Image: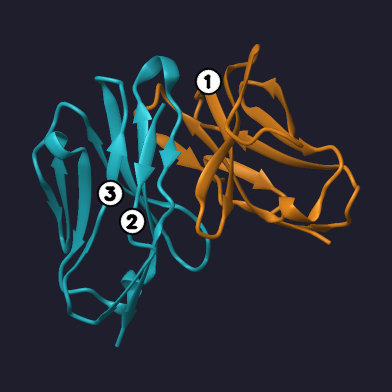
């Protein structure tokens, strides 16, 4: 069984603050993928990043960065210098590779960035 | 055209009515999924299909059925809609779990 936990239901920050969204997962699979999605108020799901279980290198993309730590089963997401346009619901998700592939989502974190 | 198309985008229906949500894809993926999103609960898996002859229940399949008419088409039916099936529904495709492509969602309201 797989499980993804996003303990922060809602986060509110002021523009230009840095914010970290936490994600903890459970899986028995040795090969799996971790994902982050953004859901703006319009409702669509926007893919942000995918990480495979063998690649623990941190990744940075502009103001976004991700910290994958297999030892603590965590895949945290940091937004640096947040902007109002970052306001959205963010989902962390897990998928085993190949035979049992299906995404298990966390509950989501509602991020509000105030001007 | 979008890679994964869901129709309708919005639907209001009455309790007890049968309704079908349709999903078609141009990704060429064998694997297709239906998810339901409720506030505070994330997305939960209703049904998934790894090929035309393969249908599997997800964690919340009660009250739903599916049909995989072709590799590119995967429909979700509510045989007798009830108000607690009001939700945002997503269809998705995948290539062996490496990447997933989602439709834009269907917002269903059961009154």
Same chain for the residues under marks 2 and 3 in the image: yes
In the rendered structure, find residue B70 and report the number of the disc placed on it. none
Distance from label 3 to label 1 (Cα)? 29 Å
Q: Position of residue A39 (x, y in %)?
A: 44, 59
Q: Secondary structure at mark 1?
A: loop
Instruction: Give the labeled residue for mark 3.
Output: A23
For marks 2 and 3, give the CA distance. 7 Å
Q: Chain of mark 1?
A: B
Q: Nearer the viewer, mark 2 or mark 3?
A: 2
Disc 1: CA contacts within 10 A as few (<14), some (14-19) or many (>=20): some
Q: Please name which of the two marks, 2 or 1, marks the residue nearer to the observer.
A: 2
The image's mark for residue B30 is 1
Label 2: state its secondary structure. Answer: loop
**Quadrant assignment, res A79:** bottom left
Q: Which tint is chain A? A: cyan
Q: Is residue A87 above or below residue A105?
A: below
- The residue identified by callout 2 is A7
- Residue A49 place in picture, x, y as percent: 27, 45
Q: Residue at x 29, y 88 (%)?
A: A115
Query: Label 1 near label 3: C-beta < 8 Å?
Result: no
Q: Are marks 2 and 3 in contact (CB under 8 Å)?
A: no
Q: Specify the quadrant of the image occupied by residue B48.
A: top right
Which residue in the rendered view is the most extreme toward the bottom? Answer: A115
Name the element at disc 3.
loop
Q: Colour of chain B?
A: orange
Q: Position of residue A24 (x, y in %)?
A: 27, 44
Q: Nearer the viewer, residue B6 or A28?
A: A28
Give the mark, 2 or 3, whose residue is nearer the N terminus. Answer: 2
Q: Is residue B28 above or below residue B43?
A: above
Residue B107 visible somewhere in the drawing: no
């Amino acid at each position: 069984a797989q499980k993804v936990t996003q303990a922060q239901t809602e986060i509110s920050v002021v523009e230009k603050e840095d914010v970290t969204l936490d994600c903890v997962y459970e899986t028995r699979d040795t090969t799996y993928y971790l994902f982050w999605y953004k859901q703006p108020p319009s409702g669509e799901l926007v893919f942000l990043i995918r990480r495979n279980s063998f690649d623990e290198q941190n990744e940075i993309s502009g103001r976004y960065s991700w910290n994958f730590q297999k030892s603590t089963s965590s895949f945290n997401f940091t937004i640096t210098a947040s902007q109002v346009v970052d306001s959205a619901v963010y989902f962390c998700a897990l998928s085993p590779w190949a035979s049992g592939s299906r995404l298990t989502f966390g509950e989501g974190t509602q991020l509000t960035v105030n001007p | 055209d979008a890679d994964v198309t869901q129709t309708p985008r919005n639907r209001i229906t009455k309790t007890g009515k049968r309704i079908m949500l349709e999903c078609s894809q141009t990704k060429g993926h064998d694997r297709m999924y239906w998810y339901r999103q409720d506030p505070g609960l994330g997305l939960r898996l209703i049904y998934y299909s790894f090929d035309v002859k393969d249908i599997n229940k997800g964690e919340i399949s009660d009250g739903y059925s599916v049909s995989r008419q072709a590799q590119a088409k995967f429909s979700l039916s509510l045989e007798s809609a009830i108000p607690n099936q009001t939700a945002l529904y997503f269809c998705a495709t995948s290539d062996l779990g490496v990447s997933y492509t989602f439709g834009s969602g269907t917002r269903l309201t059961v009154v």
